[in-house]
Image (tube, rainbow, N blue to C red):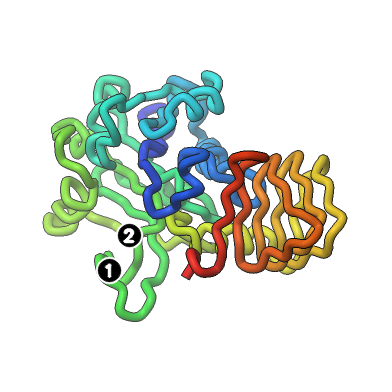
Amino acid sequence: MTGSLCAVVLAAGEGTRLRPLTFLRPKALCPVGNVALLDRALTDVDAAGLRGAEAVAVNASWLADQVDDHLAGRTHLSVETDGPLGTTGGVARLRDWINGRAVLVANADAYRRGAGLRALLDGWDGECVRLLGVPASAGAVGTFSGLTFAGASLLPWRWVRDLDVTRPELVHSVWRPAEAAGVLQVVVHAGHFTDAGTPADYLAANLHAAGDGNLIADDAVVTGPCHRAVVGAGAAVHGALTRAVVWPGAHVGAHEHLVDAVRAGQAGRAVTVTSARLA
């Protein structure tokens, strides 16, 4: 199966909902549980048997140089220099690289735990479009068979071949047309999923990664009390943290108490997203 399959990890979005954090890093490089979201997506793809620049592509646009440096040649990179093309355009621009293969498409801002992306491949007939889904909350819109999209889909080549690079989203160019044609299958994700695209959901994903304890990088300096905190490499925390995230290299002063907050950046460019912004 994987010999005729490739993967595209979508990482080009500007992350406007996640600002001001995404003024510092592209959304795909924002850490969850001290691991960049992009690296989590690549780990999921790797577990499905896809790795290396021949089998895996990443698209980038906003702060693309950071994505390029981070990948360091681990994947094929498609840079959208005039701004993000959207999910359809991002895949369509890679048509020559895809070159007749089916495509496992994964969103870089999807935080998943539990069963990986192999569920999309198990028992696949090679013809149907597949989506990964989780049970929809009450009143949710845009669902598929009562499920909410969980950040990954599987597209046969025939659905990729004629994609229009100017059409923005796969939901309109592939998923809904496949649903109308009776060839859309929605596979339930057996595990946790959070779309980490807003500050509140980004914090929630980090807290899920921390569980009931703390995740503190080995070289972080922490002298203050922490409760359900995530502290990145090289960070210095001398105050208190309660349900908080401190990015690599960031600093929390001795008289500070961050509650339901994210601290990012370094001296002279520090950013704090507090509960008022998370609401």
* Left or right, residue 123 beside residue 126: right
Q: Vertically, is 173 above or below 2?
A: below
Q: Which residue is mark 2?
A: 186
Residue drawn at x 12%, y 58% as measured from the top left: 180
Q: Which residue is mark 1?
A: 145
* Left or right, residue 130 beside residue 121: left
- Residue 170 rendering spot, x and y as whole percentages: 23, 46
Q: Residues within 10 Å of mark 1 (few under 14, many from 20)?
A: few
Image quadrant assignment for residue 72: top right
Q: Nearer the viewer, residue 117 or 201?
A: 201
Q: Vertically, is 207 above or below 46?
A: below
Q: Is residue 198 visible?
A: yes
Q: Nearer the viewer, residue 161 or 220?
A: 220
Q: Residues within 10 Å of mark 2 (few under 14, many from 20)?
A: many
- Residue 3 rendering spot, x and y as whole percentages: 41, 27
Residue drawn at x 52%, y 19% as measured from the top left: 73
Q: Marks 2/1: CA distance?
A: 7 Å
Mark 2 element type: strand
* Left or right, residue 124 beside residue 44: left
Image quadrant assignment for residue 104: top left
Kind of residue sitting beneath label 2 = Val
* Left or right, residue 251 beside residue 12: right
- Residue 264 rendering spot, x and y as whole percentages: 61, 47
Q: Residue furthest bottom?
A: 138
